[in-house]
Amino acid sequence: MTVVDATLVGPMYVTHDIYRLLLGPSWSRVDTARLERAADDRIVLVTGASSGIGEATAELLGAAGATVLLAARRADRLELVRDRITAVGGHAAAYPVDLADLDAVDRLVQDVLVDYGRVDVVVSNAGKSIRRSLADTTDRWHDVTRTNSVNYLGPVRLLTGLLPQMRARGTGQVINVSTLNVDLPAAHWAVYSASKTAFETWLRCIAPEIRVDGVATSSIHFPLVHTPMSAPTYGPWVPGLTAAQAAEVIGRVLVTRPRVLIPWWTRGAALLTTLAQGPYEAATAAVLRIARSR
């Protein structure tokens, strides 16, 4: 699916398979027949579809029978993904859009509803990752605003445009591709974690309102996934999932519709860091102090 995935073969790929097994059965690939029944004749909008998790998800769902609407900034990359899906008999369409441009998001909503009349599933995957200390953020306010726009404001604007037709039809699903940073705040990840947490909180608040009308919401708090976005921060030797494996998790969530999917060990760690926030911060500060002294 991506250059990163293509390199993860042999022993390295086995490592990723073992890592997925350690996450539990809910993180495994769903039976192909079940996925095809869930995806067949569905219109699925995937944001961030030009690479990484979004690209892999679009190809997986396209092969399963969904009509996949591809949304991302890079038109040339979207066209390549679309062409690969259609070349094997699938249905896909490309919609270049920058989620940080709210007017462009409104046009996306209008265009897809004019072209297809409905959207059954939104895979809210597009995101901007940023690892930067507070000191390094002081003179880069544009990083804060863009991260917030891509990870929170843009997805909210998109869903406020698409949810009315789902609610009116009494069916639909929103799949939020989130991160365990929501559960485990960490130094140098403040801007990214805050933006992802904001969208997750918004989704939790509206979930009861739209559930009444038959629309399901699912959030996946992914651990590390090796994609072009994560590559500058984490090398391939760090345990994690491949983009293809992450797409298979999204496929399972499309079928099973859990409200939230979190690595089992994250729940315990999140509870510990909440109940012992002072000691946790002191320990983190000690690690940072050592790192600075080197």
Image (cartoon, rainbow, N blue to C red):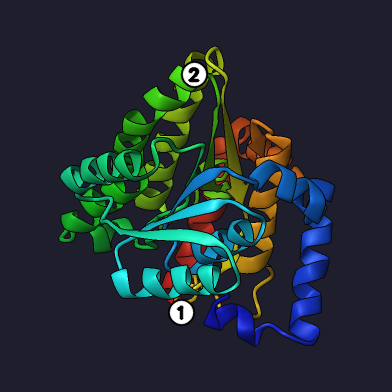
x and y percentages locating residue 36 in the rendered image: 72, 50
**Separation of residues labelled 1 and 2 (CA atoms):** 52 Å
Q: Quadrant of residue 134?
A: bottom left
Reply above or below: 87 against 68: below
Question: Does residue 140 appear left or right of residue 80 in this picture?
Answer: left
Reply above or below: 90 against 76.
above
**Front residue of this view, candidates 168 and 252:** 168
Q: Is residue 283 left or right of residue 143?
A: right
Residue 224: mark in rendering: none
Q: Position of residue 270 (x, y in %)?
A: 64, 39
Q: Residue at x 58, y 59 (%)?
A: 62
Q: Where does the image place residue 7, in percent across and percent down from the top left? A: 63, 87
Give the residue pinned by disc 2. 210
Question: In this view of the protein, which residue sits in the foreground, 18 or 6?
Answer: 6
Q: Is residue 266 visible?
A: no
Q: Is residue 268 left or right of residue 250?
A: right
The residue at 28%/50% (across/down) is 99
Q: Quadrant of the N terminus?
A: bottom right
Which of the two marks, 1 or 2, is nearer to us in this view? 2
Q: Position of residue 225 (x, y in %)?
A: 59, 64
Q: Residues within 10 Å of mark 2 (few under 14, many from 20)?
A: many
Residue on which the image places disc 1: 294
Q: Earlier in the sequence, mark 1 or mark 2?
A: 2
User: What residue do we see at 31% from left, 50% from top?
Assistant: 150
The answer to whether the residue labelled 1 contacts the one labelled 2, judged by CB atoms less than 8 Å apart, is no
- Tag 1: amino acid: Arg
**Residue type indicated by callout 2:** Ile
**Which element is circle 2 on?**
helix
Residue at (69% x, 33% y) in the render: 258
Identify the element where label 1 is drawn. loop
Q: Is 7 or 44 nearer to us in this picture?
A: 44
